[in-house]
Every structure is written in structure tokens, then in C-alpha cells.
Image: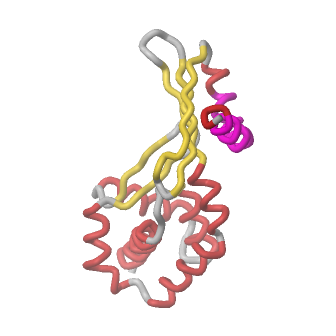
């Protein structure tokens, strides 16, 4: 029975990722699974780990958040075994995604990360995405990790004004 359960959790993850246009943070999917009483946090973590190991999903990690997307193999697996996921669960997932679409857009549209460069500075990169396409991206070199983190942390609140100001300046 435990094997069947983990299979359902994995299918829920695969199905959810198949229904969105951009990579999702783990929390969006975990919240659905846990809030609907399917299992606990540790089993969800295990399911994500097994899917990553089998290369059915791909992980893209920023300095504070990991995003997941379905691989081609994951989609093929879902097509082969998706029938094991009841229509009731599929409908619940679809409703969850629809109800939380603005939160999901907010979580996936604005991405920020930083990295150490070969010269010892830090490059903070802030991206505005729409349906997994980059609409606006800003990269700033700074001298300290603390400054890079501040830039990344402030991106969510400053992005709209920066985008609008940049467009206004460049299109005048």
C-alpha cells in the first residue's frame, strides 16, 4: 500500500506540473497535497526526490527557492500511468490551480538569484517572466553578497516600477 501511495503523490506532482506554463516552486504543489490530506511533508519530499532521481522532473534552484518542471520523460510517464490518478483528484488539482492562479503567477513571474563571479564580485540577476518567457531581466554586479541578497529580496516590490521606468526611458 505504501508503494501505491507514493505513486499517487508522484502522479499528482507530474499532473500538476503538466498543467502549468512555467516551473513551479515546490510549496505550491506541496500545499495542495498536504492541505487535501493526502500525506505529510516528508512523504512529499520523498516523492520529489524520487522524481528528480528518475529525471521525470527538473529542478532549477535560486538562492532561496527551487522551481520544478516536467521533463519529456516525465510527460511520457504521466501519459502511460496517468490513468491511475482518479478524475476526482484531477478535478481537485485543476480547481486548486484555478483558485490559486494569482498566487502561482506571483510566485513564478518574478525570479531573482545571484552568483559569485570569477573576479570576486557578485552578479544579482532579476527576471520578470510571463508563461516561462523572459520579459525583462536586470543583472547588476555588486561588491558584496549582502548587496546581492538585498537586490534579490527587493526585486518583488521594485520590479513593476523598474520595468515601467525602463520601458518609458527606452521607448521615448
Kindly indicate the quadrant of the structure image that contains residue 97. Answer: bottom right
Highlighted range, magenta: 149-168
Kindly indicate the quadrant of the structure image that contains residue 152. Answer: top right
Which colouring convention does the figure follow? secondary structure
The residue located at (49%, 63%) in the rendering is 44
Residue 38 at x, y percent in the picture: 54, 76
Residue sitting nearer the eye, 55 or 40: 55
Magenta-span inclusion, residue 159: yes
Residue sitting nearer the eye, 126 or 30: 126
Q: Quadrant of the C terminus?
A: top right
Residue 123 at x, y percent in the picture: 53, 23
Q: Quadrant of the N terminus?
A: bottom left
Residue 37 at x, y percent in the picture: 60, 77
Give left or right: position of 6 versus 172: left
Total residue callouts: 0
Judged by its main secondary structure, the magenta piece is helix
| 150 shown above or below 155 | above
Give left or right: position of 94 versus 156: left
| 86 shown above or below 142 | below
| 168 shown above or below 86 | above
The residue located at (66%, 62%) in the rendering is 103
The residue located at (62%, 24%) in the rendering is 148
Residue 46 at x, y percent in the picture: 43, 59
Magenta-span inclusion, residue 89: no
> Quick one: which residue is furthest to the top in this view?
119
The residue located at (60%, 20%) in the rendering is 145
> Quick one: which residue is furthest to the front in this view?
172
> Quick one: which residue is furthest to the bottom in this view?
87
Residue sitting nearer the eye, 7 or 19: 19
Give left or right: position of 167 versus 84: right
Amino acid at each position: 500500500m505504501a508503494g501505491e501511495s507514493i505513486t499517487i503523490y508522484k502522479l499528482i506532482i507530474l499532473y500538476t506540473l503538466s498543467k502549468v506554463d512555467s516551473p513551479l516552486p515546490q510549496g505550491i504543489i506541496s500545499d495542495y497535497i498536504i492541505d487535501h490530506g493526502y500525506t505529510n511533508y516528508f512523504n512529499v519530499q520523498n516523492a520529489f526526490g524520487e522524481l528528480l532521481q528518475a529525471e521525470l522532473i527538473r529542478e532549477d534552484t535560486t538562492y532561496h527557492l527551487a522551481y520544478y518542471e516536467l521533463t519529456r520523460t516525465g510527460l511520457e510517464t504521466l501519459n502511460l500511468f496517468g490513468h491511475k490518478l482518479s478524475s476526482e483528484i484531477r478535478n481537485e488539482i485543476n480547481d486548486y490551480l484555478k483558485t490559486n492562479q494569482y498566487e502561482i503567477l506571483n510566485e513564478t513571474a518574478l525570479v531573482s538569484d545571484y552568483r559569485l563571479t570569477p573576479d570576486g564580485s557578485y552578479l544579482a540577476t532579476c527576471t520578470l517572466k510571463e508563461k516561462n518567457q523572459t520579459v525583462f531581466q536586470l543583472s547588476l554586479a555588486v561588491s558584496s553578497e549582502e548587496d546581492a541578497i538585498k537586490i534579490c529580496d527587493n526585486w518583488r516590490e521594485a520590479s513593476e516600477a523598474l520595468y515601467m521606468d525602463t520601458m518609458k526611458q527606452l521607448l521615448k
